[in-house]
Image (cartoon, rainbow, N blue to C red):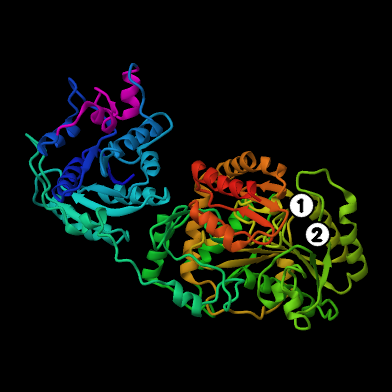
Amino acid sequence: MKGIFITGTDTDAGKTVVTQGILHALRRRGGNAMLSKPVQTGVRQGVAPDFDTVLQNLSISLPAEHRSALLPFCFEAATSPHLASRLEPQRPAPTVHAIVENLRQAETWYDFLVVEGAGGLYVPLNDTETMLDLAAALDFPTILVVRNTLGCLNHALLSLEAIQRAGISCLGWILCETTPPQDGLEETIRRDTRPSLSARTTLPCLAEIPWQNVSETLPLWEDVPETLLEMLTPIPPTPPEDLLPFDRQHLFHPYTSITAPLPVYAVSSARKTTLQTVDGQALTDGMASWWCAIHGYSHPHLVSAIQQQAAKMAHVMFGGITHPPAVALGQKLLEMLEQHLERSPFEHIFFADSGSIAVEVALKMAFQYWRKQGVENRTKLLTLRGGYHGDTFGAMSVCDPVTGMHSLFQGILPRHYFAPRPQCRFHDPWQEADFHPFRQLVEEYHAEIAAVILEPIVQGAGGMWFYHPQYLREVRTLCNQYGILLIFDEIATGFGRTGKMFAMQHAEVIPDILCLGKALTGGMLSLAAVLAQPKVTENVGTLMHGPTFMANPLACAVACASLELLQTTPWQAQVQKIETILQEEWTPLAQLSGVREVRVLGAIGVVECADDVPVAAFQQFCVRCGGWIRPFGKLIYLMPPYVIQESELRDLCQIVRSWCENL
């Protein structure tokens, strides 16, 4: 649907004045715009005061069918919707679902809807839903109407924060005077509102509406800014210059030959779970941008965090300097670990540029730990086959020796020890024999091993493999026995992806060093963190690593915002819902001849095919069907944003089903 949602700081903030003015201006431009007032209270003898007055002022008449869709819930009591419906039990209580369905019907008649909410954002529609829930469900850009009076700064800032936290796009705010001009302190307060509010939010003031006499009829706000109308009815952009020829000739892409590259698709914007291509196609993203965009794209709360921080300080060297975003992020990470682990021994944090660099830092910590103690022979690492830890040299050396590019750099990469991939599945009964090869390697080479590094529970880019939690418990016990440091790479699994905040919680095992990344910033900027126990850092001394953009303030600020968002949204329910849908949709695929296995854990779904998936042909098929899924090897997988809608996820699952049924 196309439209805009008008809300206010409170009742009688001036929403209807704004709504009427915008509707009038849009219709004057020749558009087929229409007003919707989903809930109207204070209705007398079938007349809805605000709704009918606006239509009368603009000389609009409606068929009865249209009226019932645009004004679906009416009550006589002039009170909040939830109370009005209790007082009039013969009428159905308003619900978000019912309102959206009515507006979908109205969409077939009108090309643009101006939807006016009742009161403010937290006005209850019923016992469980508010106007904010309706705004989020509609997913229209929102304008906040601010009544210019004492106390409006507080109401406005809280409302704008609520809009952004809910992931709703906000165009800005409009200041409205609802009482006649006055001399003295009241007028001083009014003059101060705009500069004071502008100084405290990055969202723009779209207009100021002076007081108008409303004693007889609703006044018509004639002076609608042209810039606002352009936001609502944008001029179609000029098609951009074709990006693909230059890209093909000059730009490297990940794991792709520059002389014989795979096809690429030009994307102009991204919002929530949708990638918009330059030629106008909308693609539902099943990759969360390689697993990091857990809140979806362009979330207003994250965008605002970057904007506000950029206005203060985009970057400053971390050598000899600290700053509030870095300290705040460090505090949040330690608090989060303390909250989700039975005990959290982590005290020290190194902020790295990316996941690969975080692994490099963790390995340096392990090696320096032993050198500081005068132990020279512990120069090897032990890890698992099927793992992936990054593409820099230290990280690459502990990736799977077959799929991890070792053959390309033979004789250059350091050689380490690899145990077989665990075979005991996550949900299967534990098999003690599965751990014997790992135990034998430790017993034979423990004097050389500085650290064990592995991905807990889920091996990601190395094969999307889910193994038994007991394996981690056995590793921890053995590392303790032989004094070997244990490093967990939770770059892909941290922050809820497996159904727990951290994958190690499945085993209730805590490493000595922990790497986090990807979803840390919600996919907005590159940042990773290495956390270490004091027993490690006390024996490291000066860690010889210092990236130019270490603890970048922009990245730290948006990471703080992303963690706040994660902790205040129902991420566990979202992940559980994704897991349920993936199981429902994909479990039957295991019976197909071209499918070897289906695996699902948390917000991760994997279809392992019998043969390698042709990347170019598969992606062309997905794009044609309106989805973005990138396979590798024999694996087709989904790791979508947590905010993906059920219909979107089922559509992606159906795309994969259609492909597999034709193998």
Q: Which of these two is toward me, 506 or 313?
A: 506
Q: Amino acid at mark 2?
A: Arg
Q: Secondary structure at mark 1?
A: loop
In the rendered image, is residue 367 in sight? yes
Q: Amino acid at mark 1?
A: Tyr
Span of residues in magenta: 61-89
> In the image, is residue 81 part of the stretch drawn in magenta?
yes
- The answer to whether mark 1 and mark 2 are in CB contact below 8 A is yes
> Residue at left 55%, top 46%?
571
Q: Residues within 10 Å of mark 2 (few under 14, many from 20)?
A: some
Q: Is residue 57 above or below residue 493?
A: above
> Residue at left 51%, top 59%?
522
Q: Which of these two is toward me, 113 or 161?
A: 113
Counting from the top left corner in percent of width and height, residue 336 is at: 59, 54
Q: Which of these two is toward me, 446 or 280?
A: 280
Counting from the top left corner in percent of width and height, residue 35 is at: 22, 39
Please indicate whether residue 65 sits to the left or right of residue 213 in the image: right
Q: Which mark is residue 421?
A: 2
Q: Is residue 647 above or below residue 470?
A: above
